[in-house]
């Protein structure tokens, strides 16, 4: 599996309801995309929960790397670039991915950490995978995934998981 994430910083005066409408209109289409485990439409809005800028981003968990390649190379990504420009896309090999019992994601938390060069890589990745299994069973969690040193939690409770 593979995690892909990109973000677009938007002007301070941008009407964020346009992004929410876009997600509502297009969200159902993503359920039919082959090899896509999930896609999250994400917004950061000035003044909400400490955000200092407006941002629209998407987070994908692909079952197969080739499906993501096809999405990029066969024109699937064109609708994004035509609307917002071409972003840098961060990708990660998924170490662990789990769906929780939550159904209404409201928050996304990320954590990035460097694994020291002399650390036991197997133990470090096993620890992150265990974290993923644990948080995916927490009430309100929609999905959790770990890729490399990158951890993501989609949380329906807004519990402010802090790292």
Image: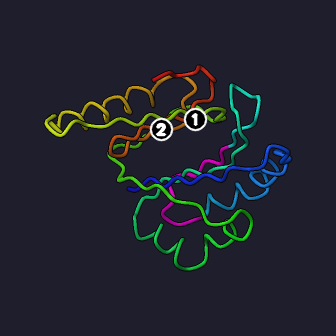
Q: Any magenta on residue 44? A: no
Residue 22 at x, y percent in the picture: 78, 55
Left or right of 150? Residue 121 is left
Residue found at x 41% / y 37%: 112
| Residue receiving disc 1 | 108
Q: Is mark 2 on a helix, strand or loop?
A: strand
Left or right of 112? Residue 46 is right
> Dot 1: few (<14), some (14–19), or many (≥20) neighbours within 10 Å?
many
Q: Do the residues labelled 1 and 2 touch (CB within 8 Å)?
A: yes
Residue found at x 63% / y 59%: 30
Q: Any magenta on residue 37? A: yes
**Magenta region: which residues?**
33-42
Query: Which disc is residue 122 wearing?
Result: none
| Residue receiving disc 2 | 152
Compare marks 1 and 2 and give the one earlier in the sequence.
Answer: 1
Depicted 143 relative to depicted 85: above or below: above
Q: Is the C terminus in the top left, top right, bottom left or bottom right quadrant?
A: top left
Q: Quadrant of residue 142?
A: top right
Left or right of 15? Residue 77 is left
> CA separation, marks 1 and 2?
7 Å
Depicted 32 relative to depicted 122: above or below: below
């Amino acid at each position: 599996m593979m995690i892909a994430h990109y973000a677009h910083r938007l002007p301070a005066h941008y009407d964020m309801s346009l992004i929410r409408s876009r997600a509502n209109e297009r969200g159902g289409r993503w359920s039919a995309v082959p090899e896509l485990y999930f896609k999250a439409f994400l917004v950061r809005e000035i003044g909400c929960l400490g955000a200092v800028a407006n941002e629209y981003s998407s987070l994908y968990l692909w079952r197969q790397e080739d499906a993501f390649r096809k999405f990029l190379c066969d024109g699937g990504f064109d609708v994004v670039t035509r609307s917002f420009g071409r972003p840098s896309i961060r990708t990660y090999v998924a170490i662990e991915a789990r769906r929780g019992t939550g159904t209404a994601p409201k928050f996304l938390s990320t954590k990035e950490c460097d694994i020291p060069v002399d650390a036991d890589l197997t133990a470090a990745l096993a620890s992150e995978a265990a974290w993923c299994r644990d948080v995916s069973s927490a009430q309100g969690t929609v999905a959790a995934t770990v890729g490399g040193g990158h951890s993501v939690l989609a949380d329906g409770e807004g519990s402010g998981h802090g790292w």
